Image (spheres, rainbow, N blue to C red):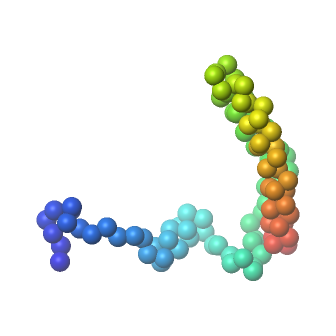
């Protein structure tokens, strides 16, 4: 039964089928964790360029602001996440082959 007033309509969460179809629509084929992913990995120079852009954006955002004293800690925090990302990238590379 439908009401004239939308405030009487119960809130509904998206179904798992809707979520899956949205993922397919946005990203195409999604292999399971056991399957190798056929998509290519980014080239090393692309990743390096992206990291440099991120660092430049952080420096540009915090430079000449009241948060500038926290900039060094923020940059070191971003760098310390690198080894974790490298381990994940190694897992991705193994899965892709």
Pinpoint residue 76: horizontal percent, then vertical percent: 80, 39
Q: Quadrant of residue 68?
A: top right
Outermost residue toward the bottom in this view:
34
58, 52: nearer the viewer: 58
Judge from the rendering whether residue 46 lies leftward or rightward of residue 8; answer left or right. right
Q: Quadrant of the C terminus?
A: bottom right
Vertical position of residue 28 compared to residue 47: above or below: below
Residue 47 in view, yes or no: yes
Residue located 42% across and 70% down the image: 14
Pinpoint residue 38: horizontal percent, then vertical percent: 75, 71
Outermost residue toward the top in this view:
64
Q: Quadrant of the N terminus?
A: bottom left
Residue located 40% across and 70% down the image: 13
15, 72: nearer the viewer: 72
Vertical position of residue 57 compared to residue 18: above or below: above
Pinpoint residue 96: horizontal percent, then vertical percent: 81, 70
61, 46: nearer the viewer: 61
Residue 60 in view, yes or no: no
């Amino acid at each position: 039964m439908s009401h004239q007033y939308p405030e009487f309509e119960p809130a509904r969460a998206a179904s798992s089928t809707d979520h899956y179809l949205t993922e397919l629509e946005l990203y195409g084929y999604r292999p399971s964790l056991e399957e190798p992913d056929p998509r290519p990995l980014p080239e090393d120079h692309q990743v390096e360029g992206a990291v440099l852009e991120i660092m430049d954006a952080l420096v540009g955002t915090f430079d000449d602001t009241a948060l500038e004293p926290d900039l060094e800690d923020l940059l070191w925090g971003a760098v310390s996440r690198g080894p974790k990302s490298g381990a994940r990238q190694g897992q991705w590379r193994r899965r892709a082959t």
